[in-house]
Amino acid sequence: MNNQSITTNKLSEVPSDLRASTLVKVRKGSWWLRLTTLFLVDYTLLFLAWVLAGHQFSYEHFTWYIATHYLQILVTITIQIGSLALEGIYREGQKRYDYFNIIKSLTFAHGLILLACFLYKPIVDITQPRLILLSWLLSIFFVCTGRYGVNITLQYLRKQKKIARSSVFIICDPQDHEQITSFIKKEKHYIVSGTANANALDRYQRQQTLNQLNQLGVTEVFISWDALKNRMFLCWLFQASGIQVHILPMELKPIYRNVEFHKIGGMPCLSLDCPIITGKDFWIKRSCDFCVAALFLMLSFPIYIAIAIAIKLDSPGTVFYKQTRIGLHGQQFKVWKFRTMRSDAEKLQKELEALNETKDGIIFKIKDDPRITNVGKFLRRYSLDELPQLFNVILGEMSIVGPRPLPIRDVDKFSEHHFIRHEVLPGVTGLWQVSGRSNILDFEQVIALDMNYIENWSLGLDFEILIKTVMVVLKKEGAY
């Protein structure tokens, strides 16, 4: 009893899925102050531009001077602000000071305003083209001047007052520390809070590194390509903690979705976008997992009963088969399945190892496995043997979509780069299952699919895999 409680406590202390924060967190840093400042400055200056343009005309032509019509000026400014936002003018980096894009966005916004005047009740009197022209010119002048003023002010504060800077951390090889630090300091935008060697990202040290970054109040981390190598999944770990990731001089090949290329102190750099609210998508996923699993169990209860009766009539043994598998962060848990093999299947496996069809021997697969019962063949063909794993989903040990959990026998043969599978919750179905299932006999292909899933994960991808799973099961593709 004591051992069981100790095991439960240890499991509760294990960090959560790579994609999740322990609690949903707001991205770290002063991005919100920058965004609020730019938004208020732009709104004020655009309002001033329209008011000054209206001063050139009489009140009968410019109805915004009537208090009841102030809503109309706010609508037009909202169109302008929206156009600037869509062009990325409020994002961090030099793009917010790209004056050509500001002019282009405001020109587009004025085009929309003119179109609205033609199609609907006029927002402004378009019989006065000088009003539109003057408001366009004043909007461009004021916004560009405002951006320039904000930029000059920030540069002064960072240089003279040593404020409005981001606390950053550098992870690279020892010989690169000094050079990378000098490049970053050229921006006068960052305060380098510390450096670490590449081994700080190793599997057994990365949590300690993350704790150190949180203690230092780091908001952004710079990682050299040589230090990153095959540790791409670490970007999830940093982002789940609200820390933005920058990758320094690297091989130019696709490594991640939603990356932005720019320069830091003249040095090329890829920045991975960190969402404002981190971890929210994962907790939506977990909530959906629980609700879908619970609802399906209630609605399909008669199917479970029918399968249980069929198994008992077909062969001696238990209805359910529980096997120890490796889940999140290498923790062992019991996977539930309907029994599809003889009760002595595990003992017979040692005698059948020579018939294993996989290339590297990590996964055990035989096309005509003599241990499978008659009912078991039917259950496997339609993946009905996996249905009890919905209990694992409800218990939080598995997700509906994710890399499939493997037995201890398979994990014992893993190479170091294979353990990435254990950084996210295992799933009842996954990209492997909808990309060939049992027809994939090379475990490196499985790892490639898992990497593809982890790096490109989204709620939309989970839904797509779920739909494909239904189609694959109905077509009975690649299952044995």
Image (cartoon, helix red, strand yellow):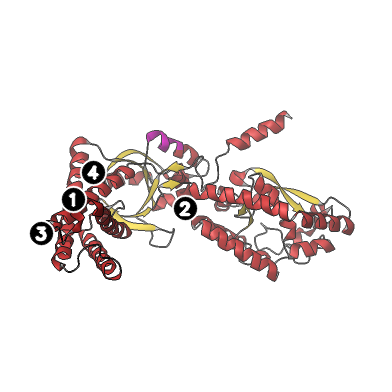
User: Which residue extends farthest top?
Assistant: 2
Q: Which residue is label 2 attached to?
A: 232
User: Where does the magenta region start and end?
Assistant: 211-217
Q: Which residue is label 1 attached to?
A: 146
Q: Marks 2/1: CA distance?
A: 39 Å
User: Which residue extends farthest left?
Assistant: 56
Q: From the image, state whether disc 3 or disc 1 is nearer to you.
A: 3
Residue type highlighted by circle 4:
Lys
Q: From the image, state whether disc 2 or disc 3 is nearer to you.
A: 3
* Residue at position x 51%, y 40% in the image: 22
* Residue at position x 43%, y 51% in the image: 228
Residue type highlighted by circle 2:
Met
The tag on residue 219 is: none
**Lower position in the chain sequence, tag 2 or tag 3:** 3
- Label 3 crowd bin: few (<14), some (14–19), many (20+), radius 10 Å: few
Q: Are marks 4 and 2 in contact (CB under 8 Å)?
A: no
> Residue 50 in the image: x percent, y percent?
18, 56
Displayed quadrant of residue 12: top right
**Lower position in the chain sequence, tag 1 or tag 4:** 1
Q: Nearer the viewer, residue 297 or 355?
A: 297
Displayed quadrant of residue 387: bottom right
